[in-house]
Amino acid sequence: MQTIDIQNLKANDIIRKCVHCGFCLATCPTYQLLGDELDSPRGRIYLIKSALENHHFSKQSIIHLDRCLTCRSCETTCPSGVEYAQLTDIGREFIEQKRPLWQKVYRYFVRQFLTTPILFNSIGFIFRHSQVKGKSIKPIVKIGKVLLLGGCVQPMLAPNINHSIKNILAKLGYETIETPQKQCCGAIDQHLSASHDALAKIKQNIDTWLKVETEVIISSASGCGLMVKEYTSMFEALDPYYQKAQLIINKTKDIAEFLADQDLSQLNLEKVDISYHEPCTLQHGQQLGGLVDSILNSLGYQQMPVVDSHLCCGSAGTYSIFQPKLSQQLRANKLKHLQVTNPQMIVTANIGCLMHLQKQIKIPVKHWVELLDNQT
Amino acid sequence: MSNRINQLQQLIKDTNNLHINSEWLAYTGVIEYFPEELIITIKAGTKINDIQIQLAKYNQTLPFFIKTADMSIGAAYAQGAQDLSDCVLGVKIIDGTGEYLNFGAQVMKNVAGYDVARLLVGSKGKLAIITQISFKVMPISYMTQLSAPIKRAITSQLHQQIEQKLKQVFDPRGIFN
Amino acid sequence: MEVIQQLLKQLKGIVLTGKENTRPFECDGLSVYRQKPLAVVLPENIAQIKQVLKICKDNNTPVVTRGAGTGLAGGAMPLENSVVLGLSKLNQVKSIDVENQLAVVEPGVKNIAISEAVRQHGLYYAPDPSSQIACTIGGNVAENSGGVHCLKYGLTVHNVEAIKMLTIDGDELILSRQDDGLGLLALMNGSEGLLDIITEVTVKLTPTPVLARVVMAGFDSVRDCANVVADIIKAGIIPAGLEMMDSFAIEAAEEFAKVGYPLDAKALLLCELDGTQTQVQAELDSVLEVLSGASTLKVSESEEERLNFWKGRKSAFPAVGRLSPDYYCMDGTIPRRHLADMLEKINELSKKYQLRVANVFHAGDGNLHPLILYDVNIEGELEKVEEFGTKILKLSVDMGGTITGEHGVGVEKLNAMCHQFNAKELAIFHKIKAVFDPKSLLNPGKAVPELHRCAELGAMHVHHGKLPHTKLERF
C-alpha cells in the first residue's frame, strides 16, 4: 500500500504541473490520427488522475492508455515541464491489475520472448534484417576502453550495427567491450508494466557494468540508451542503487553523443543519398534532437528537413505488436515524408524503428553508424 | 455629453420617421487623435477630406479605399466596405429608441461583447445613427494600392431575414428609412 | 437522460458519455472553472453536426462547441447538462487557391497547419496566437484570436474571407466579406460560440516576407521599455510584432526555451521587422536608433535564431507554470500611452495583495497579459486573485481600453463586462443573440452577463475614463 501512496504523491506532483494549455494535443501522434482528446496527453493525464483518485478505470480507458506510444513528443512540446512518461508508467502499473487475463498472458509471452535470448534467437533469425558486413578491425593505438550496450534483440536482428560501431571505435583508437544479449536494459519489461522484472534486470546490469573499468558506456539503440539514462527514476533517493545508477548515467552516451566529439575524417563513408528518421527516444526521450543530423551534415550528407519529423514512426517498442492499426498508419505517413527526396537509403538510430520501417519499404533501412564503416 | 447628442436623442424620441444624412446630423470634428497610437476618433459628419488633412500632418492616412473625399465619414461607414470595416475600432450610436450607446473601444484589440462596431458597417442608416467612429490609421509609407470594394447582393432568404431581425434589435419602432 | 439515449442511438461511435470519458472535457485552457457535460460528441461530418443540433434543440439541451480546448477564458467550458460538440475530427484543408491567396479549411484544422499546408506556395496564415501549434481555426474565428503579429497583419477578423455556419436550427448560412449588407461576418468573429456553429472557413493567406528579423532588447526598467514602444511607432514604423516581457516572464520562458534571454533585464522587448531586404534594413536602422538606451541588444542573424527568440515568448504562459502551481491570466487592452502607468499600478497592486505577477504582453497594441501567480490549494488565494484581476480590468476600462483584447469573455470576465457596458448595451447583445438563437441553447450564459448579474454585483459602469454615467439606470 505504501508504494501506491508514494506513486500517488509522485503522480500528484506531475499532474499539478499541467496547466491544461493543450499544446500537447498538437504534437501527439494519436490525437493527430484520432481527433479524440481521450487519445491525447491532456486527456490521458485526466484518465490517470481519475484512476488514481477513484481507483476506477474502465475497459475503455485502458484502450486509450494502451494507444499511447510513449513517444514523449508531448514532453518536448510541454512548456510547463510535465513529465508525462513517468506519469504514464505509474498509470499503466495501476491499470495492469484491471487488464483482462488474456491480455496479461499475451503481453507476458511477448515480453519473455523478446527479452530471453534463448527463446528469441531460436525464432528471431527468421526476422533477421541484415548480416555482418566486412571484417573486424583491431584498434591499433589504444586511447581507452568503452562498454557497448549490445542490446537484447539487436545482435540477432541486425548484428552489423554493433559490428560497425566496434570498427569505428577501433579506428578512433578505442577498444570495445560488448555486453551480452541477456543484459537487457529493462525497457521492454518497464513499458509492459512489469517493473518488478525490469528492476531485477536493472540492478544486475548496474552491478555488472560498474565492474567494467571504463569511462564511457555507449548505446547504439536510442531506446535502450534512454532507459539506462533514466535508471535513477527507478529508485528512491535513499536506495543505495540510486547512487550507483547515477554513476552509470554519468557515463552513458548515445553513439551520436560520443562521435560528435571525435574527429571522423579518417572514416570511410558510404556515398549514398539518405533520409534520416530521428527516433522519438533520441529526440524527445534523450532530448538530443538534431545531433545526428548535424553529424551527418558535417560528413557531407545532404538532407532536406523531413515533414513532421517530430512524430513517431509507430514502432514504439512493442507498440507495433499490440496496436498494429495505428502503428501502420503512422508508418505509412512517416515513409511518405521520408521519401519526398527519393533517397536510396533511410537511416535511423534505433533498432525498433529500423525493423518497423523496413517492413514496408524496399530501399534499405540502416542505422546511421553503418554509413561510417564502409569497407567496399 | 454634448448638446448635439442630447438634441439628437430627443429628436429620435419625438419622431416616427427619419432619414439620416450628414448635413442633418451636423456633428463634425476630430474628437481625439493620437498619432503614436495610430488611432483617430471622429464625429460622423466630418468630411473625409478634413480627416485626411489632419492625418497627413503626421504622415498617416485612413487605410481604406476612398471613392470621394467629399463624403462624410459617417456616410462611408453606412455604405460599408470590407477595408473600411477592417479599421473600425469603436462607435457611438443612438439607436431607434434614442439611447446613446457605445460599442468597441479606442484600442487596437477588443473582443468584449459582440462586434457591433463592425456589424453596423454597411447598415445604410437604417439601424441607428452613428455619431462617432474610432479608426485605426496607418503611416502612408505602409499603404499598398487600394481598390474599390467588390460587393455582392445578398440572395439567401435566411440572410435577409436575419438582417431584418437585426434591424428590429436596433430600431424596434422602425423609424429609420 | 433522454438526450443521451438519442445521441447514443443515432450517432454510434462518436458519442462519449460517463464520468470517466467526459471529465477530460470539463474545462479548456482555463482550468479554474470546471463542469462536466452530459456527453461529448465528436462528429466526422456536417450531417452529424446537424443531427446533434436537432437532438439538442428538441431536448432543450445547451450545446457547447469546442475546438482544441486551448481558450483562456472558459469559452469552451461545458455547462451543466450540456452537450459538448467537439470539432477536432473535421481537420482537413479542403482547397488552396494560390492565385487569390485563399484557403478553404474545416473548423478543426490547427492554425499552424494552414501555414504548413501553403508554405510551398510562399504563403502563410498571418494571425498567430501563442497556442497556434494546437488551437483550431474554428476556435480562432469564434474568439477573434490575435497573436504577436496582429499590429501589422490584423486579427482573425481581418484574415477571414468567408465562413459557412450553421444556426441552431441546422440551417446553413454563408457569410462573406463581399456581402452587401450588415457586417455579419465580423459579428460572427468573436461571438464565442453563442450565435453559430462554424463549419468551414475561407482564410486569407499572406505572402511570406522575404526576410524577417527580430530585435531583442533588454531594459533596466519597465518604464523605459514601455516608453520605447511608443517611440518606435512615433518613428513611423509598424513592426510585424512588438512584444514585451518582465523579469518573471523572462525567467520562466528562458528556463523552457533556453534561447538566451537576458536574465538580469527588468524588461525585454522583442521587435520583429519584416519585408524586403531594403525595407528590413531601413526599419532596423531606425529601430536600433530608438533602442539606443537598451541595456542589451541583439538582432537575430538567422531564421532559426528568429524562431528561437519567439519560442520563449510563445511558451511564456505555460512556462510560468514552472514558477508557480497556478496562474491567472488577464487580457486587458489599454491605449499604449498609458502602458507605463498601468504597469506601475499593477506593481502596486501586486505588493498590496502579496501576489507575484509575471507580465507578458503585446506591447504594440497595448494588449496586456499580467499573469497573477498563486496556489489554488491555499485557502482564499483564488478569491484574492479574482479581486486583484477585477481591479486590473477596471483600470483598463478606466484608461479607455477594454477588459479583453483577444482571449474573450467566456465565463471568466462576465463580471468585468458589467463595468465596460451599461444595461442598455448589454440588452442589445442579448437581443442579437436572440435573433440567431431564440431559445438560447448555444453556449448560453457565456460572453454576455445577464442583467441581473450586473445588478447584483452593484457594478459601477465606467465609460472611458470619465465619471460614472449619471443617467445609468440602477436595478
Image (tube, coloured by chain):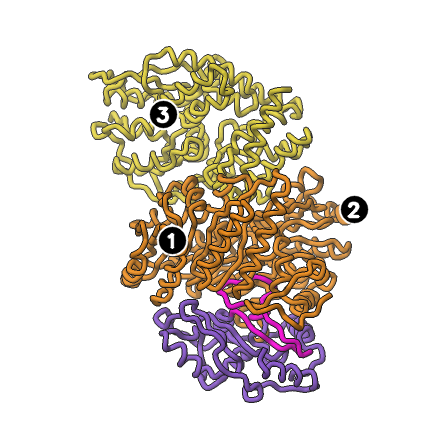
Chain colours: A yellow, B purple, C orange
- Secondary structure beneath disc 3? strand
What's the residue type where badge 1 is placed? Leu
x 68%, y 77%: residue: B171
User: Mark 1 highlights which residue?
Assistant: C270
User: Mark 3 highlights which residue?
Assistant: A253
Residue A224: in magenta span = no
Decide: is C188 above or below A75: below
- Secondary structure beneath disc 1? strand
Tell me where residue A251 appears, x and y as whole percent: 36, 21
Decide: is C57 above or below A32: below
Decide: is B154 above or below A108: below
| Residue C455 appears left or right of C391 | right
Q: Quadrant of residue C374?
A: top right
Q: Which mark is residue C1?
A: 2
- Secondary structure beneath disc 2? loop
Q: Residues within 10 Å of mark 2 (few under 14, many from 20)?
A: few
For the residue pair A6 and C383, the one nearer the viewer reads as: C383
**Closer to the observer: label 2 or label 1?**
1
**Residue furthest out toward the right:** C2
x 31%, y 37%: residue: A294
User: Is residue C103 at all visible to an observer of this figure?
Assistant: yes
Tell me where residue A216 appears, x and y as whole percent: 33, 20
**Closer to the observer: label 1 or label 3?**
1
What's the residue type where badge 3 is placed? Lys
Tell me the magenta residue range.
B89-117
